[in-house]
Image (spheres, rainbow, N blue to C red):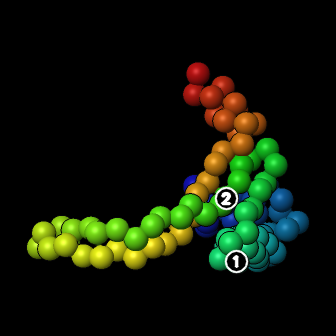
Amino acid sequence: MTKSELIDCLAARFPQLAKDTEFAVKTILDAMAEALARGERVEIRGFGSFGLNYRPSRIGRNPKTGEQVQVSEKYIPHFKAGKELRERVDLEKS
């Protein structure tokens, strides 16, 4: 599901909020992104949590030339599904 599909789905489900749905979704996603940028963890009970994983610097290869390049250290966003979400997905797929 894309961001625009989420907005459309919520607008259809709650027609009284149709005008504010896009703003609400954008505000929530922006708040989550800002919290992750500050190094904080974001937890949504029953859904999962978003955190950061550290990747140390390493030597990589340019796939086009095969030349070695230095890849700097970085933090990567990581999602871990909550128990309730894992169980719900497992029931749907069984």
- Please provide percent x and percent y for residue 15: 83, 62
Q: Looking at the picture, tell me which residue is in the foreground, 64 or 4.
A: 64
Residue on which the image places disc 2: 50
| Residue 74 in sight here | yes
Location of residue 6 by image quarter: bottom right
Q: Which mark is residue 38?
A: 1
Q: Of the residues shown, which amino acid type is indicated by label 1?
A: Arg
Which mark's residue is nearer the viewer, 2 or 1? 1
State the CA–CA distance, disc 2 to disc 1.
Answer: 13 Å
- Crowdedness near tag 2: few (<14), some (14–19) or many (≥20) residues, C-alpha within 10 Å: some
Q: Of the residues shown, which amino acid type is indicated by label 2?
A: Phe
Q: Is residue 34 above or below residue 83?
A: below
- Which residue is at 73% across, 73% downward? 35
| Residue 22 in sight here | no
- Which residue is at 66% across, 26% downward? 91
- Please provide percent x and percent y for residue 52: 61, 63
